[in-house]
Amino acid sequence: SQTIHQWPATLVQPVGSPLSLECTVEGTSNPNLYWYRQAAGRGLQLLFYSVGIGQISSEVPQNLSASRPQDRQFILSSKKLLLSDSGFYLCAWDGAATAGEQYFGPGTRLTVT
Amino acid sequence: AQSVTQPDIHITVSEGASLELRCNYSYGATPYLFWYVQSPGQGLQLLLKYFSGDTLVQGIKGFEAEFKRSQSSFNLRKPSVHWSDAAEYFCAVGLNDYKLSFGAGTTVTVRA
């Protein structure tokens, strides 16, 4: 069966520090991968998605970037965090056989102080 | 513009009572439709989906949803709510590019 992992689970970082969040998927090949941000009391905002290694599409211009160095690895980064980057970050995947049916990781709670 | 609307921000229901959560969408074509549930501090879990065919779909945990094309709606229902159903519920729609658009969510509180 497929599983999706995210780490760390929680993170407290000062303003201006770098960020690296990692997401990995097991049990499937060539998944579509997604990064979402969920601000307190709000819905999910799609940040990036990737349909293959090295292929990244950005949905919202911002302080963040994403990379996909391996088929089942998706990384969210920032060079300098802003207070507004605080939130709950969720990684998700879907496959060609389950188009649009996304499966989510447990999330990372990021607090920028 | 494409949008997903969940009109109810918060619903309180008694344990054992029925529950209905509303979802409306605005798209040019019939999209793929989903309902997800999120427990506090957790990721989202897929409850059910509609792609085509029978407009009444059954999901996990006793939930069902009905697609009504004429009303552009995909409402979620459960006949008898359990305390463990307290969570946040998200409606989502997708088009052929696989990207999903989510509603703002409805928080469900279950009282004893």
Image (cartoon, helix red, strand yellow):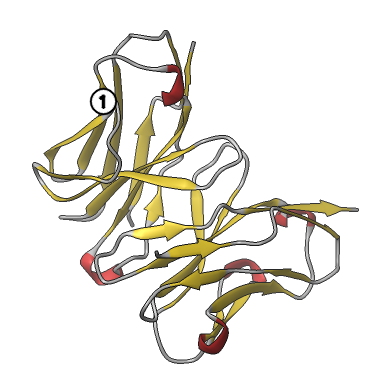
Q: Position of residue B33 (x, y in %)?
A: 45, 72
Q: Which amino acid is tagged 1?
A: Ser
Residue A28 falls left or right of residue A70? right
Q: Residue at x 33, y 57 (%)?
A: A1
In the rendered view of the protein, which quadrant contains the N terminus of chain B? bottom left
Residue that label 1 marks: A77
Residue B109 falls left or right of residue B34? right
Looking at the rendering, which quadrant does residue A100 occupy? Answer: bottom left
Q: Which residue is drawn at 15% across and 55% down?
A: A30
Residue A1 falls left or right of residue B13? left
Q: Which residue is drawn at 25% across and 49% down?
A: A33
Q: Residue at x 39, y 81 (%)?
A: B30
Q: In this view, does B75 lie above or below B98?
A: below
Please give the chain letter of the residue carrying mark 1: A
Q: Position of residue A15 (x, y in %)?
A: 40, 9
Of residues B94 and B80, the one drawn nearer to the viewer in this rendering? B94
